[in-house]
Amino acid sequence: DAGVIQSPRHEVTEMGQEVTLRCKPISGHDYLFWYRQTMMRGLELLIYFNNNVPIDDSGMPEDRFSAKMPNASFSTLKIQPSEPRDSAVYFCASSGTGVERPQHFGDGTRLSIL
Amino acid sequence: SQQGEEDPQALSIQEGENATMNCSYKTSINNLQWYRQNSGRGLVHLILIRSNEREKHSGRLRVTLDTSKKSSSLLITASRAADTASYFCATDNNAGNMLTFGGGTRLMVKP
């Protein structure tokens, strides 16, 4: 059974460029979460979706960040324009319905903005 | 701000010893979960304890929860080198669909 799939695994780009991170959740899961992990701030929730609808985006740092979920099997997190302080590991996670549902994480995208 | 705070931040032990990690949180919860993260990988769910439970076991893992003190502990018995990882506690919001993660404990188990 495939887990959460994220691409790319690594991304290095120059500041000002647009960055698009991709996520395929586990089939049948109706919650999808985007997190950012840094040494300084730990693991931060950026946004989450339920049934493809954004529920809480209060963690999105700035208007430069946007996320979409056009269907149940795909989501993107876009940064435009990117800045060096956006360098981090970005994780996507999915979970099923129910109060006691664990989240299943992808292996992340390590993003470096030069 | 982080809901859960782990203690200690780092722990180094010898193989075969027990490892205890603690987590404190601030607001009321429905459940508390523990996750493990190996270097370069995503988080993996280990165990969940409900707010009305005081202790739970899973293999070599033992989790306790004290809601009066808003704290939890994760005990790994007879540790192995493969247990080397970061361990995070996570608490849910009252709706039960969002998790807030603590800063994690980095555990190193020396062979």
Image (spheres, coloured by chain):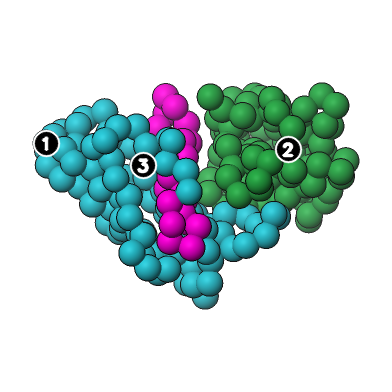
- Mark 1 is on which residue type? Gly
Chain that bears disc 1: A
Q: Secondary structure at mark 2?
A: loop
Local packing at callout 1 (Cα closer than 10 Å; few below 14, some 14-19, many 20+) is: some
**Total label count?**
3
Residue B62, above or below B2: below
Report the front residue among A60 and A84. Answer: A60
Residue B6, above or below A96: above
Q: Which mark is residue B29?
A: 2
The chain letter corresponding to cyan is A
The quarter holding residue B93 reads top right
Q: Looking at the rendering, in which quadrant would you find the C terminus of chain B?
A: top right
Q: Which mark is residue A89?
A: 3
Local packing at callout 2 (Cα closer than 10 Å; few below 14, some 14-19, many 20+) is: some
Q: Residue at x 42, y 24 (%)?
A: A40
Tell me residue A107's x, y (percent).
Answer: 42, 54
Q: Which contiguous range is marked in magenta? A: A32-54
Q: Residue at x 52, y 64 (%)?
A: A30
Inter-mark Cα distance, 1 to 3:
18 Å
Name the residue beneath numbered marker 1: A16
Report the front residue among A79 and A70. Answer: A70
Residue A59, above or below A22: above
Tell me residue B17's x, y (percent).
Answer: 75, 37
Tell me residue B74's x, y (percent).
Answer: 74, 38
Q: Nearer the viewer, mark 2 or mark 3?
A: 2
- Mark 3 is on which residue type? Val
The quarter holding residue B24 reads top right
Marks 1 and 3: same chain?
yes
Q: Residue at x 28, y 53 (%)?
A: A21
Q: Nearer the viewer, mark 2 or mark 1?
A: 2
